[in-house]
Amino acid sequence: MNSGEPKATEQARRAVGGVRRRYGVLAGVSLVLVLSGCTVGPDFVRPAPPKADGYTSGKMPAAIRSAQGQPGQRLHLQRKISAQWWDLFHSPQLEQVVRQAVAGNRSVAAARATLASARENAAAARGGYYPQADVSAGARRRNSPGQPTGGAGVSNLYTVGPTVSYALDAFGGTRRQVEQQQALAEYQGYQLAAAYLSLTGNVVNQAITIASLRAQIRATQDIIAEDARNLSLVRDKFEGGKAARTDVLTAETQLASDRTLLPPLRQQLSSARHALSILVGRSPAAWSAPDFELENFTLPRDLPLSLPSALVRQRPDILAAEARLHADSAAIGVATAQLYPSITLSASIEQQSLDSATLFNSANRLWSLSGDLLAPIVHGGTLRAQRRAAVDTYRASLADYEQTVLQGLQQVADTLRALDHDAQLVAAQRVLMDTAGEALQLQRASYAAGKSNILSLIDAQRAYQQARLGFARARAQRLQDSAQLFVALGGGWWQAKLSGPTRPQQGLR
Protein backbone atom coordinates (compact mmCIF):
# COMPACT_ATOMS: atom_id res chain seq x y z
CA MET A 1 0.00 0.00 0.00
CA ASN A 2 1.08 3.53 -0.64
CA SER A 3 1.73 5.45 2.57
CA GLY A 4 -0.10 8.44 1.05
CA GLU A 5 -3.30 6.48 0.50
CA PRO A 6 -4.75 6.87 4.03
CA LYS A 7 -4.08 10.59 3.86
CA ALA A 8 -5.86 10.89 0.49
CA THR A 9 -8.78 8.89 1.78
CA GLU A 10 -9.12 11.18 4.79
CA GLN A 11 -9.01 14.25 2.57
CA ALA A 12 -11.70 12.82 0.33
CA ARG A 13 -13.84 12.03 3.37
CA ARG A 14 -13.47 15.62 4.60
CA ALA A 15 -14.32 16.99 1.16
CA VAL A 16 -17.44 14.88 1.01
CA GLY A 17 -18.38 16.06 4.50
CA GLY A 18 -17.95 19.67 3.44
CA VAL A 19 -20.15 19.16 0.43
CA ARG A 20 -22.81 17.53 2.62
CA ARG A 21 -22.68 20.43 5.07
CA ARG A 22 -23.00 22.98 2.26
CA TYR A 23 -25.91 21.12 0.74
CA GLY A 24 -27.42 20.83 4.18
CA VAL A 25 -27.21 24.60 4.64
CA LEU A 26 -28.74 25.18 1.20
CA ALA A 27 -31.52 22.72 1.95
CA GLY A 28 -32.18 24.43 5.27
CA VAL A 29 -32.28 27.86 3.63
CA SER A 30 -34.62 26.50 0.94
CA LEU A 31 -36.88 25.02 3.60
CA VAL A 32 -37.00 28.35 5.45
CA LEU A 33 -37.87 30.15 2.21
CA VAL A 34 -40.63 27.68 1.47
CA LEU A 35 -42.02 27.88 4.99
CA SER A 36 -41.86 31.68 5.08
CA GLY A 37 -43.37 31.76 1.60
CA CYS A 38 -43.25 34.30 -1.19
CA THR A 39 -46.13 35.93 -3.04
CA VAL A 40 -46.10 35.64 -6.79
CA GLY A 41 -47.99 37.94 -9.08
CA PRO A 42 -48.13 41.75 -9.20
CA ASP A 43 -48.63 43.89 -6.10
CA PHE A 44 -51.56 46.24 -6.67
CA VAL A 45 -50.81 49.95 -6.96
CA ARG A 46 -53.68 52.45 -7.03
CA PRO A 47 -53.90 54.34 -10.31
CA ALA A 48 -52.61 57.88 -10.10
CA PRO A 49 -55.32 60.56 -9.83
CA PRO A 50 -55.82 63.03 -12.70
CA LYS A 51 -53.37 65.90 -12.73
CA ALA A 52 -55.90 68.37 -14.11
CA ASP A 53 -56.93 71.22 -11.81
CA GLY A 54 -60.27 71.81 -13.53
CA TYR A 55 -63.11 70.12 -15.36
CA THR A 56 -63.44 72.33 -18.41
CA SER A 57 -61.09 74.43 -20.47
CA GLY A 58 -60.20 77.70 -18.85
CA LYS A 59 -60.11 78.72 -15.22
CA MET A 60 -62.12 76.87 -12.59
CA PRO A 61 -65.33 78.91 -12.03
CA ALA A 62 -65.81 80.47 -8.64
CA ALA A 63 -69.48 81.28 -9.03
CA ILE A 64 -72.55 80.65 -11.12
CA ARG A 65 -73.38 84.14 -12.27
CA SER A 66 -76.76 85.62 -11.61
CA ALA A 67 -78.79 87.15 -14.42
CA GLN A 68 -81.76 89.50 -14.60
CA GLY A 69 -82.37 89.54 -10.88
CA GLN A 70 -82.12 85.75 -10.47
CA PRO A 71 -80.13 84.52 -7.44
CA GLY A 72 -76.55 83.49 -8.05
CA GLN A 73 -74.67 80.48 -6.70
CA ARG A 74 -71.14 80.41 -5.36
CA LEU A 75 -68.75 77.47 -5.70
CA HIS A 76 -66.46 76.65 -2.79
CA LEU A 77 -63.40 74.63 -3.72
CA GLN A 78 -62.71 71.63 -1.49
CA ARG A 79 -65.65 72.41 0.81
CA LYS A 80 -66.87 69.40 2.77
CA ILE A 81 -69.97 67.79 1.25
CA SER A 82 -72.72 67.15 3.75
CA ALA A 83 -74.02 63.59 4.02
CA GLN A 84 -77.55 65.06 4.01
CA TRP A 85 -76.91 67.48 1.16
CA TRP A 86 -80.64 67.55 0.30
CA ASP A 87 -81.23 69.52 3.51
CA LEU A 88 -79.82 72.55 1.66
CA PHE A 89 -83.09 72.74 -0.29
CA HIS A 90 -84.87 73.45 3.02
CA SER A 91 -87.88 71.27 2.28
CA PRO A 92 -89.15 69.32 5.31
CA GLN A 93 -91.27 67.17 3.00
CA LEU A 94 -88.21 66.24 0.94
CA GLU A 95 -86.15 65.43 4.02
CA GLN A 96 -88.87 63.10 5.30
CA VAL A 97 -89.23 61.28 1.98
CA VAL A 98 -85.47 60.76 1.66
CA ARG A 99 -85.36 59.21 5.15
CA GLN A 100 -88.22 56.89 4.21
CA ALA A 101 -86.47 55.89 0.99
CA VAL A 102 -83.14 55.13 2.69
CA ALA A 103 -84.96 52.92 5.20
CA GLY A 104 -87.24 51.10 2.76
CA ASN A 105 -85.62 51.01 -0.69
CA ARG A 106 -85.21 47.44 -1.96
CA SER A 107 -82.15 48.13 -4.13
CA VAL A 108 -80.24 49.44 -1.11
CA ALA A 109 -81.38 46.43 0.92
CA ALA A 110 -80.15 44.09 -1.82
CA ALA A 111 -76.80 45.92 -1.94
CA ARG A 112 -76.44 45.53 1.84
CA ALA A 113 -77.09 41.78 1.62
CA THR A 114 -74.67 41.41 -1.29
CA LEU A 115 -72.00 43.24 0.72
CA ALA A 116 -72.58 40.91 3.67
CA SER A 117 -72.18 37.91 1.36
CA ALA A 118 -68.92 39.29 -0.05
CA ARG A 119 -67.54 39.85 3.44
CA GLU A 120 -68.37 36.26 4.38
CA ASN A 121 -66.59 35.04 1.25
CA ALA A 122 -63.53 37.02 2.31
CA ALA A 123 -63.72 35.48 5.78
CA ALA A 124 -63.99 32.02 4.21
CA ALA A 125 -60.89 32.69 2.11
CA ARG A 126 -58.92 33.73 5.22
CA GLY A 127 -59.62 30.27 6.63
CA GLY A 128 -56.97 29.01 4.21
CA TYR A 129 -54.31 30.57 6.43
CA TYR A 130 -54.93 28.00 9.18
CA PRO A 131 -54.71 24.20 9.54
CA GLN A 132 -57.86 22.25 8.74
CA ALA A 133 -58.96 19.68 11.33
CA ASP A 134 -61.61 16.99 10.85
CA VAL A 135 -62.69 13.92 12.72
CA SER A 136 -63.95 10.72 11.14
CA ALA A 137 -65.57 7.60 12.52
CA GLY A 138 -66.68 4.41 10.86
CA ALA A 139 -67.96 0.92 11.46
CA ARG A 140 -67.50 -1.89 8.93
CA ARG A 141 -68.62 -5.49 8.87
CA ARG A 142 -66.67 -7.84 6.62
CA ASN A 143 -65.94 -11.51 6.03
CA SER A 144 -62.63 -13.18 5.29
CA PRO A 145 -61.93 -14.58 1.81
CA GLY A 146 -63.51 -17.96 1.28
CA GLN A 147 -65.89 -17.58 4.23
CA PRO A 148 -69.64 -17.33 3.73
CA THR A 149 -71.46 -14.16 4.73
CA GLY A 150 -72.63 -14.41 8.33
CA GLY A 151 -70.20 -17.30 9.06
CA ALA A 152 -67.39 -17.60 11.57
CA GLY A 153 -65.02 -15.51 9.41
CA VAL A 154 -67.16 -12.39 9.73
CA SER A 155 -65.67 -9.53 11.80
CA ASN A 156 -66.39 -5.93 12.71
CA LEU A 157 -63.94 -3.05 12.36
CA TYR A 158 -64.42 0.19 14.28
CA THR A 159 -62.37 3.32 13.56
CA VAL A 160 -62.36 6.86 14.96
CA GLY A 161 -59.82 9.67 15.01
CA PRO A 162 -58.89 13.21 13.96
CA THR A 163 -57.02 14.35 10.88
CA VAL A 164 -55.15 17.65 10.59
CA SER A 165 -53.88 19.05 7.30
CA TYR A 166 -52.13 22.27 6.39
CA ALA A 167 -51.41 23.59 2.90
CA LEU A 168 -48.21 25.60 2.93
CA ASP A 169 -48.76 28.90 1.13
CA ALA A 170 -45.27 28.71 -0.32
CA PHE A 171 -45.94 30.93 -3.31
CA GLY A 172 -48.75 33.12 -1.97
CA GLY A 173 -51.69 31.56 -3.79
CA THR A 174 -53.81 31.65 -0.63
CA ARG A 175 -52.72 35.20 0.16
CA ARG A 176 -53.71 36.32 -3.32
CA GLN A 177 -57.09 34.58 -3.00
CA VAL A 178 -57.72 36.41 0.28
CA GLU A 179 -56.61 39.67 -1.33
CA GLN A 180 -58.98 39.04 -4.22
CA GLN A 181 -61.97 38.31 -1.99
CA GLN A 182 -61.25 41.35 0.20
CA ALA A 183 -61.10 43.54 -2.92
CA LEU A 184 -64.42 42.08 -4.09
CA ALA A 185 -65.90 42.88 -0.67
CA GLU A 186 -64.65 46.46 -1.05
CA TYR A 187 -66.23 46.52 -4.50
CA GLN A 188 -69.60 45.52 -3.04
CA GLY A 189 -69.19 48.14 -0.32
CA TYR A 190 -68.75 50.83 -2.95
CA GLN A 191 -71.69 49.38 -4.88
CA LEU A 192 -73.78 49.90 -1.75
CA ALA A 193 -72.57 53.49 -1.57
CA ALA A 194 -73.41 53.95 -5.26
CA ALA A 195 -76.91 52.56 -4.69
CA TYR A 196 -77.38 54.94 -1.75
CA LEU A 197 -76.14 57.92 -3.77
CA SER A 198 -78.29 57.01 -6.76
CA LEU A 199 -81.32 56.58 -4.51
CA THR A 200 -81.02 59.94 -2.77
CA GLY A 201 -80.35 61.70 -6.07
CA ASN A 202 -83.35 60.07 -7.73
CA VAL A 203 -85.63 60.91 -4.80
CA VAL A 204 -84.68 64.58 -4.99
CA ASN A 205 -85.05 64.56 -8.78
CA GLN A 206 -88.51 62.97 -8.64
CA ALA A 207 -89.66 65.35 -5.93
CA ILE A 208 -88.64 68.36 -8.02
CA THR A 209 -90.26 66.77 -11.09
CA ILE A 210 -93.53 66.45 -9.18
CA ALA A 211 -93.33 70.10 -8.15
CA SER A 212 -92.55 71.15 -11.74
CA LEU A 213 -95.45 69.17 -13.20
CA ARG A 214 -97.85 70.59 -10.61
CA ALA A 215 -96.73 74.10 -11.59
CA GLN A 216 -97.17 73.30 -15.29
CA ILE A 217 -100.64 71.89 -14.65
CA ARG A 218 -101.65 75.03 -12.74
CA ALA A 219 -100.28 77.21 -15.54
CA THR A 220 -102.20 75.20 -18.13
CA GLN A 221 -105.37 75.44 -16.09
CA ASP A 222 -104.93 79.20 -15.87
CA ILE A 223 -104.40 79.34 -19.61
CA ILE A 224 -107.55 77.30 -20.19
CA ALA A 225 -109.41 79.76 -17.98
CA GLU A 226 -107.99 82.59 -20.11
CA ASP A 227 -109.16 80.74 -23.22
CA ALA A 228 -112.65 80.53 -21.73
CA ARG A 229 -112.66 84.28 -21.07
CA ASN A 230 -111.48 84.93 -24.64
CA LEU A 231 -114.26 82.71 -25.99
CA SER A 232 -116.82 84.57 -23.88
CA LEU A 233 -115.48 87.87 -25.19
CA VAL A 234 -115.69 86.68 -28.81
CA ARG A 235 -119.20 85.34 -28.36
CA ASP A 236 -120.36 88.65 -26.90
CA LYS A 237 -118.98 90.46 -29.93
CA PHE A 238 -120.50 87.88 -32.28
CA GLU A 239 -123.92 88.29 -30.69
CA GLY A 240 -123.51 92.02 -31.00
CA GLY A 241 -122.71 91.68 -34.67
CA LYS A 242 -119.12 92.88 -34.23
CA ALA A 243 -117.38 89.53 -34.85
CA ALA A 244 -117.63 86.85 -37.45
CA ARG A 245 -118.58 83.25 -36.81
CA THR A 246 -115.03 82.25 -37.74
CA ASP A 247 -113.76 84.19 -34.73
CA VAL A 248 -115.96 82.11 -32.45
CA LEU A 249 -114.72 78.90 -34.06
CA THR A 250 -111.11 80.01 -33.72
CA ALA A 251 -111.55 80.76 -30.02
CA GLU A 252 -113.31 77.44 -29.48
CA THR A 253 -110.50 75.62 -31.29
CA GLN A 254 -107.87 77.26 -29.09
CA LEU A 255 -109.77 76.32 -25.93
CA ALA A 256 -110.12 72.70 -27.08
CA SER A 257 -106.45 72.58 -28.09
CA ASP A 258 -105.22 73.83 -24.71
CA ARG A 259 -107.45 71.35 -22.90
CA THR A 260 -105.54 68.53 -24.64
CA LEU A 261 -102.40 69.62 -22.78
CA LEU A 262 -103.73 68.59 -19.38
CA PRO A 263 -104.04 64.78 -19.71
CA PRO A 264 -100.37 64.23 -20.71
CA LEU A 265 -99.18 66.45 -17.85
CA ARG A 266 -101.42 64.62 -15.39
CA GLN A 267 -100.11 61.28 -16.67
CA GLN A 268 -96.52 62.46 -16.21
CA LEU A 269 -97.41 63.56 -12.69
CA SER A 270 -98.92 60.16 -11.89
CA SER A 271 -95.84 58.39 -13.24
CA ALA A 272 -93.54 60.61 -11.15
CA ARG A 273 -95.60 59.91 -8.04
CA HIS A 274 -95.51 56.17 -8.71
CA ALA A 275 -91.76 56.25 -9.35
CA LEU A 276 -91.20 58.03 -6.06
CA SER A 277 -93.31 55.47 -4.18
CA ILE A 278 -91.16 52.65 -5.61
CA LEU A 279 -88.01 54.49 -4.52
CA VAL A 280 -89.48 54.68 -1.03
CA GLY A 281 -90.08 50.93 -1.15
CA ARG A 282 -93.87 51.08 -1.15
CA SER A 283 -96.48 50.23 -3.75
CA PRO A 284 -98.32 53.16 -5.41
CA ALA A 285 -101.54 51.96 -3.78
CA ALA A 286 -100.02 51.94 -0.28
CA TRP A 287 -98.11 55.24 -0.35
CA SER A 288 -98.76 58.64 -1.87
CA ALA A 289 -96.12 61.27 -2.54
CA PRO A 290 -96.49 64.69 -0.90
CA ASP A 291 -97.73 67.63 -2.97
CA PHE A 292 -94.36 69.25 -3.60
CA GLU A 293 -94.31 72.87 -4.70
CA LEU A 294 -91.46 74.68 -6.46
CA GLU A 295 -91.91 77.60 -4.08
CA ASN A 296 -91.07 75.31 -1.15
CA PHE A 297 -87.59 74.47 -2.52
CA THR A 298 -84.75 76.85 -1.75
CA LEU A 299 -82.04 77.08 -4.38
CA PRO A 300 -78.69 76.24 -2.65
CA ARG A 301 -76.54 79.37 -2.88
CA ASP A 302 -73.26 77.80 -1.72
CA LEU A 303 -72.13 74.71 -3.64
CA PRO A 304 -69.09 72.52 -2.91
CA LEU A 305 -66.59 71.68 -5.63
CA SER A 306 -63.82 69.08 -5.41
CA LEU A 307 -60.68 68.93 -7.51
CA PRO A 308 -60.46 66.04 -10.01
CA SER A 309 -57.74 64.44 -7.88
CA ALA A 310 -60.17 64.34 -4.95
CA LEU A 311 -63.12 63.28 -7.09
CA VAL A 312 -61.57 59.90 -7.93
CA ARG A 313 -61.18 59.19 -4.22
CA GLN A 314 -64.80 59.93 -3.30
CA ARG A 315 -67.11 58.91 -6.16
CA PRO A 316 -68.36 55.39 -5.36
CA ASP A 317 -68.53 54.28 -9.00
CA ILE A 318 -64.85 55.17 -9.50
CA LEU A 319 -63.87 53.50 -6.23
CA ALA A 320 -65.86 50.40 -7.20
CA ALA A 321 -64.02 50.25 -10.53
CA GLU A 322 -60.74 50.57 -8.64
CA ALA A 323 -61.68 47.75 -6.26
CA ARG A 324 -62.60 45.56 -9.24
CA LEU A 325 -59.20 46.38 -10.74
CA HIS A 326 -57.55 45.34 -7.46
CA ALA A 327 -59.44 42.02 -7.45
CA ASP A 328 -58.37 41.30 -11.03
CA SER A 329 -54.76 42.12 -10.13
CA ALA A 330 -54.89 39.59 -7.29
CA ALA A 331 -56.43 37.05 -9.69
CA ILE A 332 -53.19 37.21 -11.70
CA GLY A 333 -51.32 36.13 -8.57
CA VAL A 334 -53.79 33.29 -8.00
CA ALA A 335 -53.28 32.05 -11.57
CA THR A 336 -49.49 32.44 -11.28
CA ALA A 337 -49.36 30.40 -8.07
CA GLN A 338 -51.00 27.51 -9.94
CA LEU A 339 -47.79 27.22 -12.00
CA TYR A 340 -45.74 26.37 -8.90
CA PRO A 341 -45.66 23.29 -6.65
CA SER A 342 -48.06 22.94 -3.74
CA ILE A 343 -47.06 21.37 -0.43
CA THR A 344 -49.52 19.84 2.02
CA LEU A 345 -48.67 18.55 5.50
CA SER A 346 -51.04 16.20 7.25
CA ALA A 347 -51.22 14.19 10.46
CA SER A 348 -53.78 11.74 11.74
CA ILE A 349 -54.44 9.63 14.83
CA GLU A 350 -56.79 6.72 14.47
CA GLN A 351 -58.19 4.19 16.89
CA GLN A 352 -58.94 0.82 15.30
CA SER A 353 -60.49 -2.20 16.91
CA LEU A 354 -62.51 -5.28 16.10
CA ASP A 355 -64.45 -4.73 19.29
CA SER A 356 -66.16 -1.45 20.14
CA ALA A 357 -65.46 -2.03 23.84
CA THR A 358 -61.68 -1.86 23.28
CA LEU A 359 -61.75 0.83 20.62
CA PHE A 360 -60.07 3.50 22.75
CA ASN A 361 -57.32 1.30 24.24
CA SER A 362 -53.87 2.73 23.67
CA ALA A 363 -52.75 -0.49 22.00
CA ASN A 364 -55.24 0.18 19.19
CA ARG A 365 -53.89 3.62 18.37
CA LEU A 366 -52.37 4.31 14.97
CA TRP A 367 -50.80 7.56 13.84
CA SER A 368 -49.33 8.92 10.65
CA LEU A 369 -47.48 11.99 9.44
CA SER A 370 -47.13 12.89 5.80
CA GLY A 371 -45.94 15.62 3.53
CA ASP A 372 -47.13 15.79 -0.06
CA LEU A 373 -45.76 17.87 -2.92
CA LEU A 374 -47.72 18.32 -6.10
CA ALA A 375 -45.90 20.02 -8.96
CA PRO A 376 -47.56 20.78 -12.30
CA ILE A 377 -45.71 19.25 -15.23
CA VAL A 378 -47.95 18.89 -18.27
CA HIS A 379 -51.43 20.45 -18.40
CA GLY A 380 -51.75 21.07 -22.12
CA GLY A 381 -51.04 24.79 -21.69
CA THR A 382 -54.13 25.25 -19.48
CA LEU A 383 -52.37 26.91 -16.53
CA ARG A 384 -50.45 29.41 -18.60
CA ALA A 385 -53.53 30.19 -20.67
CA GLN A 386 -55.43 30.85 -17.45
CA ARG A 387 -52.73 33.27 -16.34
CA ARG A 388 -52.79 35.08 -19.69
CA ALA A 389 -56.57 35.31 -19.41
CA ALA A 390 -56.20 36.85 -15.93
CA VAL A 391 -53.77 39.43 -17.32
CA ASP A 392 -56.18 40.29 -20.14
CA THR A 393 -59.03 40.63 -17.65
CA TYR A 394 -56.91 43.04 -15.62
CA ARG A 395 -56.21 45.12 -18.71
CA ALA A 396 -59.93 45.26 -19.49
CA SER A 397 -60.66 46.35 -15.91
CA LEU A 398 -58.00 49.05 -16.18
CA ALA A 399 -59.65 50.41 -19.31
CA ASP A 400 -63.06 50.29 -17.57
CA TYR A 401 -61.60 52.18 -14.61
CA GLU A 402 -60.14 54.87 -16.85
CA GLN A 403 -63.45 55.17 -18.70
CA THR A 404 -65.33 55.50 -15.39
CA VAL A 405 -62.98 58.31 -14.34
CA LEU A 406 -63.52 60.12 -17.65
CA GLN A 407 -67.29 59.79 -17.33
CA GLY A 408 -67.15 61.15 -13.79
CA LEU A 409 -65.14 64.17 -14.94
CA GLN A 410 -67.59 64.71 -17.80
CA GLN A 411 -70.59 64.55 -15.48
CA VAL A 412 -69.15 67.26 -13.22
CA ALA A 413 -68.17 69.39 -16.23
CA ASP A 414 -71.63 69.05 -17.78
CA THR A 415 -73.32 69.96 -14.51
CA LEU A 416 -71.16 73.04 -13.97
CA ARG A 417 -71.97 74.29 -17.46
CA ALA A 418 -75.63 73.42 -16.99
CA LEU A 419 -75.86 75.46 -13.80
CA ASP A 420 -74.43 78.48 -15.59
CA HIS A 421 -76.85 78.06 -18.48
CA ASP A 422 -79.76 77.37 -16.12
CA ALA A 423 -79.33 80.76 -14.48
CA GLN A 424 -79.42 82.45 -17.88
CA LEU A 425 -82.41 80.38 -18.98
CA VAL A 426 -84.46 81.12 -15.87
CA ALA A 427 -83.76 84.84 -16.26
CA ALA A 428 -84.68 84.79 -19.96
CA GLN A 429 -87.85 82.78 -19.32
CA ARG A 430 -88.87 85.21 -16.60
CA VAL A 431 -88.50 88.18 -18.93
CA LEU A 432 -90.32 86.31 -21.67
CA MET A 433 -93.20 85.40 -19.37
CA ASP A 434 -93.61 88.94 -18.06
CA THR A 435 -93.45 90.41 -21.57
CA ALA A 436 -95.84 87.84 -23.00
CA GLY A 437 -98.27 88.47 -20.15
CA GLU A 438 -98.31 92.20 -20.82
CA ALA A 439 -98.69 91.59 -24.54
CA LEU A 440 -101.66 89.29 -23.88
CA GLN A 441 -103.43 91.91 -21.78
CA LEU A 442 -102.89 94.53 -24.46
CA GLN A 443 -104.14 92.21 -27.19
CA ARG A 444 -107.24 91.34 -25.18
CA ALA A 445 -108.03 95.02 -24.66
CA SER A 446 -107.28 95.76 -28.30
CA TYR A 447 -109.58 92.99 -29.48
CA ALA A 448 -112.36 94.13 -27.14
CA ALA A 449 -112.04 97.62 -28.63
CA GLY A 450 -112.19 96.20 -32.14
CA LYS A 451 -108.64 97.27 -33.03
CA SER A 452 -107.23 93.77 -33.68
CA ASN A 453 -108.44 90.43 -34.87
CA ILE A 454 -108.87 87.14 -33.04
CA LEU A 455 -105.72 85.61 -34.56
CA SER A 456 -103.54 88.23 -32.90
CA LEU A 457 -105.20 87.48 -29.58
CA ILE A 458 -104.70 83.72 -30.03
CA ASP A 459 -101.02 84.21 -30.92
CA ALA A 460 -100.50 86.31 -27.80
CA GLN A 461 -102.29 83.69 -25.74
CA ARG A 462 -100.09 80.90 -27.17
CA ALA A 463 -96.88 82.88 -26.53
CA TYR A 464 -97.87 83.48 -22.92
CA GLN A 465 -98.73 79.82 -22.47
CA GLN A 466 -95.34 78.67 -23.71
CA ALA A 467 -93.57 81.27 -21.57
CA ARG A 468 -95.31 80.16 -18.36
CA LEU A 469 -94.62 76.49 -19.00
CA GLY A 470 -91.01 77.23 -19.95
CA PHE A 471 -90.46 79.26 -16.78
CA ALA A 472 -91.75 76.41 -14.59
CA ARG A 473 -89.51 73.89 -16.38
CA ALA A 474 -86.46 76.17 -16.19
CA ARG A 475 -86.87 76.71 -12.43
CA ALA A 476 -87.16 72.96 -11.89
CA GLN A 477 -84.16 72.25 -14.11
CA ARG A 478 -81.99 74.63 -12.11
CA LEU A 479 -82.96 72.89 -8.88
CA GLN A 480 -82.34 69.46 -10.41
CA ASP A 481 -78.93 70.43 -11.77
CA SER A 482 -77.96 71.79 -8.35
CA ALA A 483 -78.85 68.40 -6.88
CA GLN A 484 -76.99 66.68 -9.72
CA LEU A 485 -73.79 68.50 -8.76
CA PHE A 486 -73.92 66.96 -5.28
CA VAL A 487 -74.46 63.52 -6.81
CA ALA A 488 -71.66 64.02 -9.36
CA LEU A 489 -69.24 64.92 -6.57
CA GLY A 490 -70.06 61.80 -4.54
CA GLY A 491 -72.78 63.15 -2.28
CA GLY A 492 -70.90 62.75 1.00
CA TRP A 493 -71.85 59.06 1.27
CA TRP A 494 -68.71 58.34 3.33
CA GLN A 495 -70.27 60.25 6.22
CA ALA A 496 -73.53 58.29 6.07
CA LYS A 497 -74.19 55.20 8.17
CA LEU A 498 -74.59 52.48 5.56
CA SER A 499 -73.79 49.44 7.75
CA GLY A 500 -77.40 48.68 8.61
CA PRO A 501 -79.03 45.24 8.81
CA THR A 502 -77.50 42.99 6.17
CA ARG A 503 -80.14 40.28 5.99
CA PRO A 504 -83.84 39.86 6.76
CA GLN A 505 -84.48 38.12 10.05
CA GLN A 506 -87.91 36.63 9.49
CA GLY A 507 -88.00 33.16 8.00
CA LEU A 508 -84.30 32.44 8.60
CA ARG A 509 -83.22 29.40 10.58
Image (tube, grey):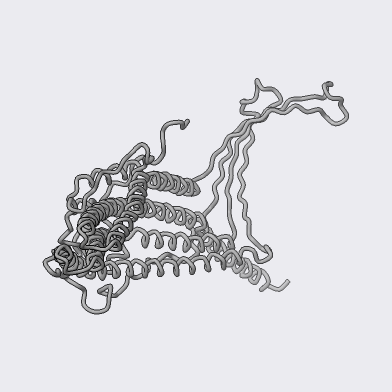
Pick the residue in front: 57 or 285. Answer: 285
Identify the image quadrant of residue 410: bottom left
Q: Position of residue 304 (x, y in %)?
A: 20, 62
- Identify whether 99 is placed above or below 69: above
- Identify whether 40 is placed above or below 506: below
Identify the image quadrant of residue 481: bottom left
Identify the image quadrant of residue 335: bottom right
Pick the residue in front: 191 or 139. Answer: 191
Is 420 displayed left or right of 350 in the figure?
left
Q: Answer whether residue 44 is visible to the viewer in this image.
A: yes
Q: Residue pushed farthest bottom? A: 58
- Identify whether 105 is placed above or below 319: above
Is 33 displayed left or right of 384 in the figure?
left
Residue located 42% across and 44% down the image: 113
Q: Residue pushed farthest right? A: 146
Q: Position of residue 391 (x, y in %)?
A: 52, 67
Residue located 29% across and 70% down the image: 413
Q: Position of residue 358 (x, y in %)?
A: 65, 22
Pick the residue in front: 89 or 261. Answer: 261
Q: Position of residue 173 (x, y in %)?
A: 52, 57
